[in-house]
Image (cartoon, grey):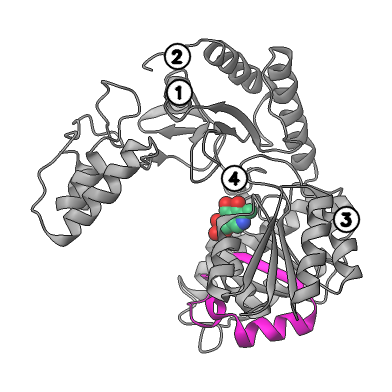
Amino acid sequence: MSRAAQRLGGSAARAVGAGSGVIAGAEPRYGNDATPVPATGPSDGGALDRLADEVLGGIRERGTYRRMRVLEGVQAPRMTVDGRDVLLFAGSNYLDLARHPEVVAAAERGTRQWGCAAGGSRLITGNLACHEALEAELAAFFGREAALAFNTGYMANVGVIPALVGPGDVLVSDALNHASIIDGARLARCDVEVFAHGDVDAFGQTLAAARARARRVLVAVDGVYSMDGDVAPVAEIVRRAREVDAIVLLDDAHGTGCLGARGRGTAEQAGVLGEVDVLMGTLGKSLGSFGAFVVGSSRLRELLVNTARSFIFSCALAPAQVEAARAALRLVDAEPWRRARLAANCDRLRARLADAGLSTAPSTTHILPLVLGDNARTMAVCEALLERGFYAQGIRHPSVPQGTARLRITPMATHEPHEIDALADALVGLVGDPAPSGD
Ligand SMILES: Cc1ncc(COP(=O)(O)O)c(C=O)c1O
């Protein structure tokens, strides 16, 4: 048993090992440990083992078993993945700020000044001056009255949505919205009306029906769809929502820092930055730190401080992350070349693949899907790509609809053009091949 599997211990280790090889005949290995993990292990028959066997068995049958790869090295365009030195096209550190000297120095300073932990929830002992400073800077960055930090984007959505709607209210939701919006609606126990992805007419009809029957209507959309890389029709959504007095929540986890002339994201690009009621963004993707935030009115902040349970009942962000995020925010303004190079790299890859007849539609952004459809084939291509020195993660159901498994390719601002070309060549070679190595 590998050291990684041993650390998990007992049945968990067996569950991780069982069936996790995505290429038929290959032994799954973890980290740099060369010891193969046994493909199956005996169960001791307890209730937990029976549950795990049943659930994991179903997952394996559907071809959606997941395991975690082990990465080593500083977050950068080149990293070690499962012991292989590869070019990374799978992360969300789009602007390559996570290792920026100013961001790292800010995290170090933050730790020295404030310690390693906030030491409590914001409403008890965890509200440090650095949290308040970050929020003031976020509000200024977006030109809005106020901001409130959350520990992750997931926690922001599951906190904000129940703060805005409840039983009898309606959430109008795009069909491809992120899981955290769906889970937020579950916690809110509101009704959910789903409209066809990105379809403005379907949105209008769903909104009108919701308005006709509900006291309060919340519209929630992702800014950039995390598995497709297309952008929501934000201007039209805001306009129509305003007409019927519905609240708009824009989850711009992937747009923040990257889109818009000044990196303010999807709403800036759509010309409605000041009009989105609740703008959520993350600190852990293009901003190279960790956490999330909501910006909007002072009244919104006051409401969330008093009612958003994921804010109230959770320890505050660590000072290192807060200070890193503050530095990253300054760099979005100070180094606009990162945004420009990210867009140029993505355009280059899109064009190279299109020349070879490979579509990355509907993406117009820095998230490029290459839809292959079949789960096994997608994961085999992912592995074959790794063998050639590139990491772009294969994505399967439930992260994407059944039958639309894909490689999710995310170039960074600091990839060199020849690295983009090398990835394109590898993809064209592999995806043109009906049976990539190991399939
Ligand atoms: C659209 C969207 N919203 C929210 C989140 C959650 O953000 P976090 O990773 O900070 O929890 C993600 C994560 O990838 C996302 O893609």
Q: Is residue 428 left or right of residue 433?
A: right
Q: Nearer the viewer, mark 3 or mark 4?
A: 3
Distance (Cα) linking label 3 and label 4: 25 Å
Residue drawn at x 71%, y 47% as measured from the top left = 197
| Mark 3 Cβ inside 8 Å of ligand 1 | no
- Could you tell which of marks 4 and 2 lies nearer the N-terminus? 4
Residue 377's disc is 1
Q: Nearer the viewer, residue 407 or 78?
A: 407
Q: Which residue is mark 2?
A: 436
Can residue 302 be found in the magenta stretch?
yes
| Mark 4 Cβ inside 8 Å of ligand 1 | yes
Q: Is disc 2 surrounded by few (<14), some (14 to 19) or many (20+) residues within 10 Å?
A: some
Q: Nearer the viewer, mark 4 or mark 2?
A: 2
**Which type of secondary structure does the marked residue at label 4 adopt?**
loop
Q: Which residue is mark 3?
A: 235
Residue 92's disc is 4
> In which quadrant will I find the N terminus?
top left
- Could you tell which of marks 2 and 3 lies nearer the N-terminus? 3
Distance (Cα) linking label 1 and label 4: 24 Å
Extent of the magenta region: 292-318
In the rendered image, the vertical position of residue 278 relative to residue 439, given as above or below: below
Q: In the image, ligand 1 is in what quadrant?
A: bottom right
Residue drawn at x 36%, y 16% as measured from the top left = 438
Can residue 177 be found in the magenta stretch?
no
In the rendered structure, are the residues bearing label 1 and label 2 in contact, judged by CB atoms less than 8 Å apart?
yes
Distance (Cα) linking label 2 and label 3: 43 Å
